[in-house]
Image (tube, grey):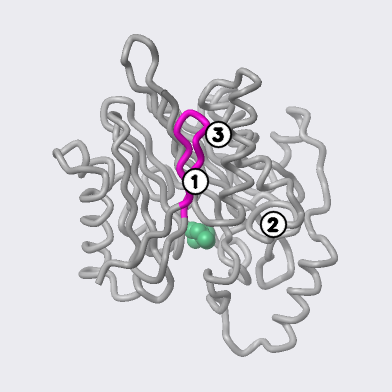
């Protein structure tokens, strides 16, 4: 049995379908998730992540990604990478080909090129037009972009249970970060423990939303630890979100979302604000769900 959870409506649909197609072609869990996120990054019609997404305040796209394999807690990440996509594949290469966890900026780009990724111009006419529009009405500072309009991150968690009944979990995320962010700013998505976490002995979790707050909360790790302490996946996510709402004054400025998948297939999701639409795929049966904020 294979279960996948993917964030947000439009990009999530592209991601989940691509991941399941990869499975039909024989992909393992890490590859399914990589292919799912890569499809979102490379689709210029999605303003969510990767090619043609919303840039920083200089009009430059800086991409982040991370992947974690719950089998041995191995992980790889890249941040602030320009002119390269899909960065989820570069994060996977960091995990599999280096002894490190994260490469940043120009050196991550150099590593990608050395490993065969062809540089591309990530800015499309559509995202340049959006940037110009934002520049013209530049009165709302950095976090103006409401995440209800278009989401900047796709996060995916997956569980595979083999014939021996042993669970295997993977979590991954790819993002262009918050639109109009300060150049060089990195959010939660490429940070293991904040944006993603996976441990075959417990479960996996992933976050999306206001990265500064999710990072302060170590939201994904906290949710996995909550499941380790005996909570259901839903209780685990709700505890994380309630804790954020109680301790972090900015955690309801924009949605802060966490979703979790326990090693027995139990799932949960919670958000500090608004609705959180996400997709579930169970052995190819794809279902769409909408979660409301905690009140
Ligand atoms: C970030 N968490 O860079 C990301 C943004 C995001 O939907 O998830 N947007 O802070």
Note whether 10 is above or below 40 in the view shown: below
Residue in view at x 76 percent, y 50 percent:
83
Residue in view at x 58 percent, y 32 percent:
20
Image x and y of residue 167, in percent: 34, 22
- Foreground residue among 73 and 114: 73
Which label sits on residue 6?
A: 1
Kindly state the secondary structure of the residue where label 3 is placed.
helix
Provide the residue span drawn in magenta: 278-288
Residue on which disc 2 sits: 46
Mark 3 or mark 2: which comes first in sequence? 3
Q: Main secondary structure of the magenta part?
A: strand
Q: Look at the numbered discs 3 and 2 and tell me whether their residues touch, using CB distance below 8 Å.
A: no
- Foreground residue among 283 and 226: 283
- Foreground residue among 76 and 28: 28
Mark 1 or mark 2: which comes first in sequence? 1
How many residues crowd mark 3 within 10 Å: few (<14), some (14–19), many (20+)?
A: many
Total numbered badges shown on the rendered structure: 3
Note whether 51 is above or below 282 in the view shown: below
Give the Cα distance between marks 3 and 2.
18 Å
Q: Is residue 144 left or right of residue 272?
A: right
């Amino acid at each position: 049995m294979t279960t996948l959870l993917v964030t947000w409506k439009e990009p999530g649909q592209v991601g989940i379908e691509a991941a399941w197609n990869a499975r039909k072609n024989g992909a393992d869990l890490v590859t399914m998730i990589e292919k799912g996120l890569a499809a979102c990054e490379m689709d210029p019609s999605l303003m969510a992540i990767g090619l043609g997404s919303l840039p920083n305040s200089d009009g430059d796209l800086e991409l982040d990604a991370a992947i974690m394999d719950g089998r041995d807690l191995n992980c790889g990440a890249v941040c602030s990478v320009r002119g390269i996509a899909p960065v989820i594949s570069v994060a996977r290469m960091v995990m599999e080909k280096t002894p490190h966890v994260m490469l940043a900026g120009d050196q991550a780009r150099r590593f990608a090129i050395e490993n065969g990724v062809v540089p591309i111009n990530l800015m499309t006419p559509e995202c340049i037009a959006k940037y110009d529009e934002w520049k013209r009405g530049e009165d709302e500072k950095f976090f103006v972009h409401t995440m209800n309009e278009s989401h900047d991150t796709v996060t995916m968690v997956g569980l595979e249970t083999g014939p021996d009944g042993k669970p295997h979990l993977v979590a991954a995320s790819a993002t262009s970060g918050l639109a109009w962010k300060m150049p060089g700013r990195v959010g939660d998505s490429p940070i293991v423990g904040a944006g993603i976490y996976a441990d075959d002995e417990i479960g996996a979790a992933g976050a999306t939303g206001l990265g500064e707050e999710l990072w302060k909360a170590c939201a994904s790790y906290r949710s996995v630890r909550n499941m380790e302490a005996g909570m259901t996946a839903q209780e685990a996510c709700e505890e994380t979100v309630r804790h954020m709402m109680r301790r972090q004054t900015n955690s309801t400025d924009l949605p802060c979302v966490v979703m979790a998948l326990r090693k027995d297939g139990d799932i949960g999701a919670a958000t500090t604000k608004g609705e959180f639409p996400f997709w579930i795929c169970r052995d190819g049966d794809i279902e769409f769900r909408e979660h409301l904020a905690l009140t």
